[in-house]
Image: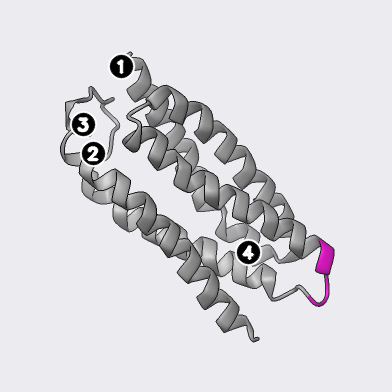
């Protein structure tokens, strides 16, 4: 299997996770989320879909680039992709906690764990393929911002 097929498979997985999270997010955006007090730096709702789409594409390319090194660095790649799958699962769970359960405090605890797993994935990816690691930097930054936003929403609405 060549690198582009691996990236395409990773892209399908990442976008499927994003889509599944959106099925919980969308209904709450129009009902519950609009009732919450939000900080002044809260972005407009329309910004989230394109940002997440770009981040899922970056994640997929990164995972595909790492996966492509499986023959040369089998154990390291398996470990790195294991962390990638854990963080991707945590990524989806956040939406269910925040929007599905409408529990910003639980989502805040979970997003801290998510950020740590993304960071560990970044550390593992950059050792295998520098470009793959660099592709995770915007994701790390966005999730850090999302954590601050999540904390602010929790604080303002507790």
Give the residue at mark 3: 32
Nearer-the-camera pick, 63 or 22: 22
Based on the picture, tell me whether residue 74 belongs to the magenta stretch.
yes
- Check the image and report above or below for 90 versus 20: above
Marks 2/3 in contact by CB < 8 Å: the verdict is: yes
Q: In which quadrant will I find the N terminus?
A: bottom right
Q: In which quadrant will I find the C terminus?
A: top left
Q: How packed is label 3: few (under 14 Cα within 10 Å), some, or many (20 or more)?
A: few
Q: Say the numbered circle drawn on residue 28.
A: 2
Q: Residue at x 27, y 50 (%)?
A: 47
Earlier along the polypeptide chain: callout 3 or callout 1? Answer: 3
How far apart are the alpha carbons under marks 2 and 3?
5 Å
Q: Which range is magenta?
A: 71-75
Q: Residue furthest front?
A: 101
The residue mark sitting in front, 4 or 2, is 2
Main structural element of the magenta stretch: helix, strand or loop? loop
Q: Position of residue 69 (x, y in %)?
A: 74, 74
The residue mark sitting in front, 4 or 3, is 3
Q: Residue furthest bottom?
A: 2
Based on the picture, tell me whether residue 17 belongs to the magenta stretch.
no
Give the residue at mark 1: 156
Q: Residue at x 31, y 45 (%)?
A: 24
**Which secondary structure, mark 2?**
helix
Give the residue at mark 4: 132
């Amino acid at each position: 299997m060549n690198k582009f097929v691996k990236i395409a498979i990773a892209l399908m997985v990442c976008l499927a996770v994003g889509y599944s999270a959106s099925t919980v997010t969308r209904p709450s955006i129009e009902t519950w989320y609009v009732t919450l007090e939000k900080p002044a730096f809260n972005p407009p709702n329309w910004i989230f879909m394109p940002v997440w789409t770009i981040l899922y594409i970056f994640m997929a390319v990164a995972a595909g680039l790492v996966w492509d090194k499986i023959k040369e660095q089998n154990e390291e790649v398996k470990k790195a992709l294991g962390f990638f799958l854990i963080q991707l699962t945590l990524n989806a769970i956040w939406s269910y906690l925040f929007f599905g359960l409408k529990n910003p405090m639980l989502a805040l605890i979970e997003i801290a764990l998510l950020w740590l797993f993304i960071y560990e994935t970044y550390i593992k990816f950059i050792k295998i393929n520098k470009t793959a690691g660099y592709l995770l930097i915007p994701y790390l930054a966005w999730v850090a911002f999302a954590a601050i936003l999540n904390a602010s929403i929790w604080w303002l609405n507790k």
